């Protein structure tokens, strides 16, 4: 599994049980198990939710699924 696929999978797993749509960065942080401190790791790559929040813009919201969140974050983070 590539780093991108691994991180994507971890984001989806972290959002299991989240209520969608997610309309704001704060709602996204609230949906994660450790809020902005939620961290995904793969090999030497570590991505904190707070870091991911920096690559998202208002135009990215609302998110309608965990897959949509994961795809947007890994693409914007350049993974």
Image: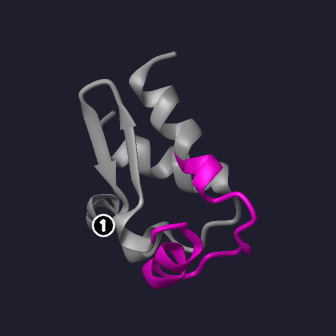
Instruction: Look at mark 1 in the image and give the residue it sits on.
Output: 50
Residue at x 46%, y 68% (from the top left corner): 34
Residue at x 70%, y 75% (from the top left corner): 21
Residue at x 35%, y 66% (from the top left corner): 37
Quick check: 70 above or below 9? below
Instruction: Identify the element where label 1 is drawn.
Output: helix
Q: Which residues are magenta?
A: 11-34
- Given residues 20 and 29, the one toward you in this image is 29
Q: Position of residue 9 (x, y in %)?
A: 58, 37
Image quadrant in which the C terminus is located: top left
Quick check: 31 above or below 4? below
Whether residue 28 sits left or right of residue 65 in the image: it is: left
Q: Position of residue 41 (x, y in %)?
A: 37, 38
Quick check: 39 above or below 64? above
Q: Splitting the image into 4 quarters, where does residue 4 fall?
A: top left
Residue at x 54%, y 67% (from the top left corner): 32
Whether residue 60 sits left or right of residue 12 in the image: it is: left
Report the colour scheme: one colour
Disc count in the image? 1
User: Quick one: which residue is furthest to the top in this view?
Assistant: 1
Q: Position of residue 58 (x, y in %)?
A: 41, 77
Q: Is 13 within the magenta?
A: yes
- For disc 1, the neighbor class at 10 Å (few under 14, some 14 to 19, many from 20) is some
Q: Is 25 within the magenta?
A: yes
- Given residues 9 and 37, the one toward you in this image is 37
């Amino acid at each position: 599994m590539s780093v991108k696929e691994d991180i994507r999978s971890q984001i989806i797993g972290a959002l299991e049980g989240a209520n969608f749509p997610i309309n704001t960065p704060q709602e996204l942080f609230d949906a994660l198990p450790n809020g902005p401190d939620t961290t995904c790791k793969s090999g030497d790559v570590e991505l904190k939710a707070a870091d991911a929040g920096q690559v998202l813009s208002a135009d990215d919201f609302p998110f309608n699924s965990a897959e949509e969140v994961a795809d947007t974050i890994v693409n914007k983070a350049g993974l």
